[in-house]
Image: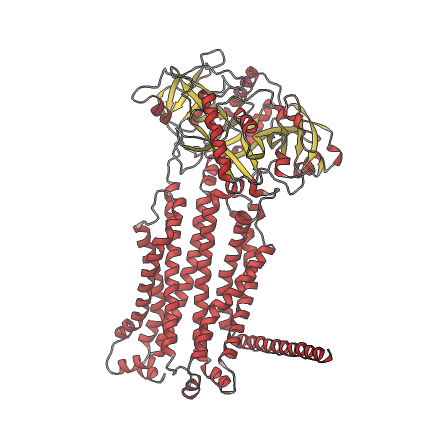
């Protein structure tokens, strides 16, 4: 027993001794590496800065990848949540909001959802302890919050009975509770007025809660019972979210919901014919629109980091040439190849660590820049930042990068003929040519990767130019838009029409105003367009189609310079006493009345606040406009006059002869001259909305262009280094040739030749890679193919020009050297 104990103690002590030796050797390696880096401050600064740029860019973009694509949604079991849409098979509409009656049928007939809830976007006017204010909100079914698995910070959630008409309950967001109610915990149970109705505050949500996750945060959630009427099946404007049962797959749920949709289509052919159900995972619904762009940007910065690693590896190889004698002496004194490789890897890891620290600072600055300048509709943009996951990624990047750029030079040195280097001196080793070939290969890879980045950036810039040149169908120049809400005023429909007309009249008389009109939505504003079913007179009850829908005032088309192709505009005479009328878009006329005039035809829409659906006579046909996106085909649309169907909240469009931004004060004065308590909000020019419509494409092109520009600089520096090294090695040869009668131009051509060969090989490999990789950009492009030859030719010429200039500088220096000076190199 004692012997066994002593052996065990010996083994433990032996292990401790070995561990101590390893730590001592490691400390020695680190100290020696620090001395070597400090002895060469120029090399160290260039290498650290080069790597820091690549690592900082990677860390910053990874913070976006994690926040937007990888971070789980802040709800219970978020992978079980799905968004439920309807899709029109006949018109091939990819997805549209369902109607509320369809939602009720889904709720009662399905066996695949644990729960299912509906919500509707709404804008409210809140009156309380402060002045009236516009607030963003949702009207939700009572089980929404329990479906998400969240609890309020104060109070309670909605009760099932509050889904029924007559119940007015509201839950406040944490920010609204703090700003409007001074964080008073006694607000729960109090009554507040929202859009002229009394609501009981039943709860306050936590500060971290957000639903839906969007650029404009939701401030109030109102129980469904506020709606006293039953929505029409042809009115599609409800969002629906569901939670799958634990053992149900997405495919099983899709199959059952398609069966339910087919059943409803047979039961309600007038509204549900050709409608099916589409299920999208909630996370995919949130980030699907930006996933490709974010991953492409992340791939781009990885390429930049690889180029930076190749550049630093080239620097280390050049430095290793000068350190040949030092390494040989260490080998002669007993250092084996493993010991030398370990020492060199320690230097590269230390260099990578210093670069990572600087890169982390650059990433911290970069994430704040991304959050500021990124498209505001990017989901979870506010969550971008440096956290534990990002720090772990940075640490892994430091280790991998240090090994990647340090391993090749270390192995090359360890395998070199060290004693020959000791005897012949620096630069004379027979392995110099092999080392030079490795450096040349690294430069070729840099040029190839840079061309791939440049090709992607060129395609995105070309696409952005074409998209910005698209005619939206209206003239945005000089048009100011803003919203006014009358919902809090107790107006009858006739009184609301009078108020809208009075507001329009006051605004038209404001200084510099040329035309003014109202609309329920602003084209390209990002506000979801309402799609409504309509039916042509004479068709069967099952023949319903869908189209974009707006309520507008007379002069709307003149204000936006939308051409009236046939018929007339609305007039003040088209009021509630006049026959119901409608104006339709060119594409709707072409689809619904092919080969004939649409004027005089009659249609009825599925939208009416009082469930009255009269036949409306077509009095005009107008040109198509782009509503959701510049890249999308203009949808069929129809317009109803505000005098026949007034809304509580409308958006004003005002064309001014003066700069629109200078009209804000006069507009507020004009509105408040009618009623001082009317909230005026969302004040923007149409040009600003147009800029927002291009924001994502512009941001993608900007970032990829920056990364490509950085890659061009790194490639040029790398090529310059290789050619400079080659010229230095051949200086004796050049001097001898010039002494024998060669001209400077001959030397210049010889020196440039090697660089030209590297550039051409890199361009060839880069073009092959670009043709294969840029296809992933297809979904981000507009009006240009991912294999556009013009773009490839331009970026290849640009890269060739820059890199050849980098070759020309050292070659020109060789061509101008005096023969006797050159002969001294030997």
Q: Quadrant of the C terminus?
A: bottom left
Residue 22: quarter of image: bottom right
Residue 737 visible, this orientation: yes
In the image, 818 versus 444, the foreground residue is 444
In the image, 239 versus 171, the foreground residue is 239
* Relative vertical location of residue 373 with respect to residue 96 in this rendering, above or below: below
Q: Tell me: 338 left or right of 739.
A: right
Q: Which residue extends farthest front? A: 1
Task: Please tell me which residue is depicted at 49% across the width and 28% down the height of the picture.
Answer: 260
Residue 514 visible, this orientation: no
Q: Tell me: 729 left or right of 614.
A: left
* Relative vertical location of residue 693 with respect to residue 421 in this rendering, above or below: above
Q: Which residue extends farthest top? A: 577
Q: Quadrant of the N terminus?
A: bottom right
Residue 123 image point, x, y percent = 58, 29
Residue 202 image point, x, y percent = 70, 31
In the image, 109 versus 400, the foreground residue is 109
Task: Please tell me which residue is depicted at 70% across the width and 78% down the height of the picture.
Answer: 4
* Relative vertical location of residue 743 with respect to residue 352 in this rendering, above or below: below
Task: Please tell me which residue is depicted at 58% across the width and 47% down the height of the picture.
Answer: 383
In the image, 823 versus 175, the foreground residue is 175
Residue 359 image point, x, y percent = 54, 61
Total marks in image: 0
Task: Please tell me which residue is depicted at 39% across the width and 75% down the height of the picture.
Answer: 435
Residue 543: quarter of image: top left
Residue 648 image point, x, y percent = 56, 23
């Amino acid at each position: 027993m004692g012997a066994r104990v002593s052996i065990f103690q010996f083994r433990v002590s032996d292990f401790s001794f070995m561990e101590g030796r390893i730590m001592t050797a490691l400390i020695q390696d680190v100290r020696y590496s620090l001395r070597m880096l400090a002895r060469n401050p120029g090399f160290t600064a260039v290498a650290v800065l080069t790597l820091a740029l690549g690592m900082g860019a990677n860390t910053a973009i990874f913070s976006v990848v994690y926040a937007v694509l990888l971070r789980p949604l802040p709800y219970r079991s978020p992978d079980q949540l799905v968004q439920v849409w309807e899709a029109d098979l006949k018109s091939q509409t990819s997805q549209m909001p369902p109607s509320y009656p369809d939602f009720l049928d889904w709720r009662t007939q399905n066996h695949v959802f644990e729960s299912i809830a509906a919500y509707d976007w709404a804008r409210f006017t809140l009156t309380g302890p402060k002045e009236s204010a516009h607030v963003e909100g949702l009207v939700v079914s009572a089980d929404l919050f329990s479906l998400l698995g969240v609890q309020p910070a104060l109070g309670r959630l909605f009760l099932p009975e509050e889904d029924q008409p007559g119940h007015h309950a509201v839950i406040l967001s944490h920010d609204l509770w703090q700003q409007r109610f001074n964080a008073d915990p006694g607000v729960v149970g109090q009554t507040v007025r929202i859009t002229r109705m009394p609501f009981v505050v039943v709860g306050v949500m936590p500060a971290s809660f957000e639903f839906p996750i969007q650029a404009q945060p939701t401030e109030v959630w109102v129980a469904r019972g506020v709606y006293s009427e039953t929505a029409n099946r042809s009115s599609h404007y409800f969002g629906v979210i569901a939670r799958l049962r634990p053992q149900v797959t997405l495919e099983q749920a899709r199959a059952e919901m398609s069966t339910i949709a087919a059943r409803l289509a047979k039961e309600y052919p007038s509204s549900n014919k050709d409608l099916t159900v589409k299920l999208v995972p909630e996370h995919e619904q949130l980030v699907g629109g930006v996933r490709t762009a974010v991953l492409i940007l992340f791939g781009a910065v990885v390429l930049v980091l690889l180029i930076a690693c190749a550049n630093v590896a080239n620097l280390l190889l050049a430095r290793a040439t000068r350190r040949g004698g030092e390494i040989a002496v260490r080998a002669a004194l007993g250092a084996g190849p493993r010991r030398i490789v370990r020492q060199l890897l320690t230097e590269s890891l230390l260099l990578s660590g210093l670069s990572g620290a600087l890169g982390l600072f650059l990433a911290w600055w970069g994430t704040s820049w991304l959050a500021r300048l990124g498209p505001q509709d990017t989901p979870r943009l506010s969550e971008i930042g440096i956290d534990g996951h990002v720090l772990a990624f940075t640490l892994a990047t430091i280790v991998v990068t240090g090994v990647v750029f340090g391993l090749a030079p270390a192995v090359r040195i360890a395998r070199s003929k060290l004693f020959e280097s000791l005897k012949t001196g620096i630069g004379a080793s027979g392995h110099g040519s092999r080392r030079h070939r490795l450096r040349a290969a690294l430069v070729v890879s840099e040029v190839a990767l840079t061309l791939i980045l440049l090709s992607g950036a060129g395609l995105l810039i070309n696409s952005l130019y074409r998209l910005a040149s698209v005619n939206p169908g209206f003239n945005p120049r000089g048009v100011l838009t803003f919203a006014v809400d009358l919902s809090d005023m107790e107006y009858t429909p006739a009184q609301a029409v009078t108020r809208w007309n009075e507001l329009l009249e006051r605004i038209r008389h404001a200084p510099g105003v040329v035309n003014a009109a109202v609309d329920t939505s602003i084209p390209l504003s990002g506000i979801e367009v309402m799609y409504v079913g309509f039916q042509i007179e004479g068709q069967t009850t099952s023949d319903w189609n869908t189209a974009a829908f707006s309520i507008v005032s007379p002069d709307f088309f003149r204000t936006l310079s939308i051409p009236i192709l046939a018929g007339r505009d609305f007039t003040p005479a088209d009021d509630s006493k006049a026959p119901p009328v409608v104006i339709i878009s060119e594409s709707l006329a072409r689809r619904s009345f092919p080969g004939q005039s649409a004027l005089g035809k009659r249609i009825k829409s599925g939208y009416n606040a009082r469930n009255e659906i009269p036949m409306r006579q077509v009095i005009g046909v107008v040109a198509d406009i782009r509503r959701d996106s510049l890249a999308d085909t203009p949808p069929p649309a129809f317009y109803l006059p505000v005098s026949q169907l007034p809304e509580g909240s409308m958006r004003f469009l005002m064309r001014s002869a003066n700069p629109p931004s200078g009209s804000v004060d006069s507009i507020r004065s004009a509105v408040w001259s009618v009623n001082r308590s009317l909230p005026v909000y969302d004040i923007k020019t149409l040009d600003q909305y147009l800029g927002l419509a291009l924001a994502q494409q512009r941001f993608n092109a900007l970032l990829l262009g920056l990364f490509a520009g950085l890659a061009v600089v790194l490639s040029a520096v790398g090529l310059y280094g290789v050619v400079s090294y080659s010229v230095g090695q051949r200086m004796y040869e050049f001097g001898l040739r010039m002494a024998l009668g060669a001209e400077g131009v001959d030397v210049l051509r010889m020196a440039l030749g090697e660089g030209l060969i590297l550039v051409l090989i890199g361009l060839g490999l880069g073009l092959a890679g670009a043709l294969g990789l840029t296809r992933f950009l297809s979904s981000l492009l507009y009006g240009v193919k991912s294999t556009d030859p013009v773009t490839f030719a331009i970026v290849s010429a640009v890269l060739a020009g820059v890199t050849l200039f980098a070759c020309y500088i050292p070659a020109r220096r060789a061509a101008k050297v005096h023969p006797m000076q050159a002969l001294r190199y030997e």
